[in-house]
Amino acid sequence: MFLRRLGPDPHANGARTIALCNCPDIFELESGDFAIIGIDITSAASPKLPPSASCGPDERIVRIPRNLLVNAKSDIPNQV
């Protein structure tokens, strides 16, 4: 299912968190899709989405730190 992590391991260089939890992450899946681990902000963010966007009942809006996506940029493919 998980093909590879995009960006550095959040525990690289000995970085630690409580029980190795609460670490946002980005993964590429075998299907070519991506999986994001982040803080669920669905209930707060859904009412503020622009009119052309919505969050379905099986979807969640997650927040990830800016540096996570910026550090993963070089691992994100440019082509579809």
Image (cartoon, helix red, strand yellow):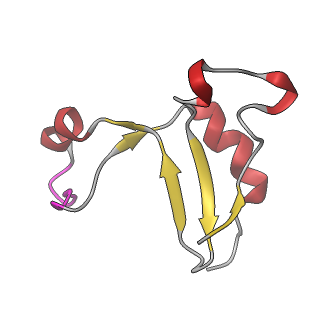
Q: Residue furthest right?
A: 13
* Quarter of the figure with the C terminus: bottom right
Residue extent of the magenta highlight: 50-57
Q: Closer to the camera, 75 or 21?
A: 21
Principal SS element in the magenta part? loop
Position of 48 relative to 32 (above/below): above
Image spot of residue 56 (x, y percent): 18, 62
Q: Closer to the camera, 2 or 64?
A: 2
- Residue 52 in magenta stretch: yes
Image spot of residue 7 (x, y percent): 74, 47
In the image, 41: left or right of 2?
left
* Quarter of the figure with the N terminus: bottom right
- Which image quadrant for residue 47? top left
Position of 73 relative to 1 (above/below): above
Position of 33 relative to 47 (above/below): below
Residue at point 14%, 54% (across, down): 51
In the image, 48: left or right of 28?
left
Image spot of residue 39 (x, y percent): 40, 34
- Which image quadrant for residue 6? bottom right
Q: Closer to the camera, 64 or 18?
A: 18
Residue at point 65%, 32% (across, down): 67
In the image, 5: left or right of 60?
right
Residue at point 22%, 62% (across, down): 58
